[in-house]
Image: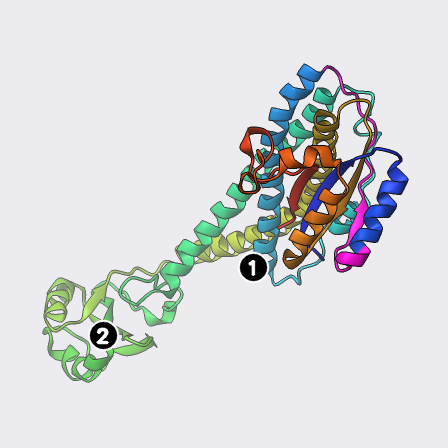
Amino acid sequence: MATRYWTVSLSVQNSASSLWTRLQESISKHSFDTPLYRFNIPNLRVGTLDSLLALSDDLLKSNAFIEGVSHKIRRQIEELERVSGVISSSLTVDGVPVDSYLTRFVWDEAKYPTMSPLKEIVDGIHVPVAKIEDDLKVRVAEYNNVRSQLNAINRKQSGSLAVRDLSNLVKQQDIIVSEHLTTLLAIVPKYSEKDWISSYETLTTYVVPRSSKKLYEDNDSSLYTVILFSRDADNFKTKARERGFQIRDFEYNVETQDSRKQELEKLMHDQDTLRSSLLQWCYASYGEVFSSWMHFCAIRVFAESILRYGLPPSFLSVVMAPSVKSEKKVRAILEGLCDNANSAYWKSEDDGGLGGPGGDADGHPYVSFTINLL
């Protein structure tokens, strides 16, 4: 599938069918690897020249906006598919792949009646796309909020023992608490484990002998319990710190543990639900925005062709996908099919021409817009 297309219109001097045949023959002969299609644009209501000129400025801005929304949704789909492990499938418009929709474009008369004023059609495209962009922001923010909460929990559960949440490492039977006894949790560096085992019983007077048990270890440290008299806990913490052992504050509470577990399960469920919902919404919305974008491209080609070639509308509009190496060749073919009397004016400044209105360096003696699908 090509990802970069040109929409082009050429002025018709005699008949559109003969110009189309000449274009096909030239492309086939000199750039056979360039796909070429008719771009069927209906006759739209022109209005006055002043209104068309005013609309032309708005078309450029609105096209950039709609194209931007299309790319935002596509990037969001790609990210969601990557995270979900979904095999990327062809994006579609009403079940038709987007490249086929473009190359076989048919104007939706029911949605955009051609008898409506051009400004009304433009607004009818722009406003719904703006609404879709607003919905996208809200949905993505909701999904990212849940992801952020889960990431925060995961960071607490996957960091070093000095800072991570210990609740999933400590079981109820590991903690002994009574009227006189308490259980402390010590973070012991790997290189100090022998020192801990040989010294913890003598750090203070009231430590229960052989009460230390290793619960967990990572690459740097190990998590040990130690049982001692409650009244001696503060003194033990001080002595442990002096030896390079960190005592973590921890209180086992069944209700808190259950609550944390339920919260984690709910967040994971919410994330999966929101991700699936957002992905399905993006698939549908991308198709809607892409369809709107192609209708907008048709309006741009129509409006610029009227401004370029005059009334009544008499032009041939096409879609093509030249490779990078074929671009100059195709440009030469298109220029060769234009009215030679005007070609010099539209050449680039480097070739001695004005380069189009306003000195546009990409000006051509025909209407040409680029459509980047990615």
Tell me the residue that label 2 is attached to. 188
Q: Quadrant of the N terminus?
A: bottom right
Inspect the image, locate mark 1, and give the three-letter code of the amino acid beneath it.
Answer: Val
Does residue 266 appear to the left or right of 104 in the view shown? left
Residue at 46%, 54% in the rendered image: 150
Q: Is residue 82 magenta?
A: no
Q: Position of residue 40 (x, y in %)?
A: 83, 38
Q: Is residue 39 magenta?
A: yes
Q: What span is in magenta?
A: 28-48
Front: mark 1 or 2: 1
Image position, residue 80 (x, y; %):
59, 54
Q: Residues within 10 Å of mark 2 (few under 14, many from 20)?
A: many
Please determine whether, in this image, residue 312 is positioned above or below residue 351.
above
User: Which quadrant of the structure image shows residue 243?
Assistant: bottom left
Q: Could you give the CA–CA distance between mark 1 and mark 2, rounded to whole angstroms?
A: 36 Å
Tell me the number on the disc at residue 83.
1
Nearer to us in this view, 177 or 316: 316
Q: Residue 319 sits in which quadrant?
A: top right
Q: Which mark is residue 212?
A: none
Element marked by disc 2: strand
Residue 160 horizontal side relative to residue 307, left or right: left
Which one is nearer the viewer's eye here, 339 or 111? 339
Residue at 52 percent across and 56 percent down: it is 265
User: How far across and down, in percent of the image, does residue 263 sit?
Assistant: 48, 52
State the image coordinates of residue 24 (x, y, percent, origin top left). Answer: 83, 50
Kindly report the secondary structure that dominates the magenta region of the rendered protein: loop
Give yes or no for contact between labels 1 and 2 (Cβ–Cβ under 8 Å). Answer: no
Q: Which residue is found at the position 53% from the left and 55% from the top?
A: 268
Circle nearer the N terminus (1, 2): 1
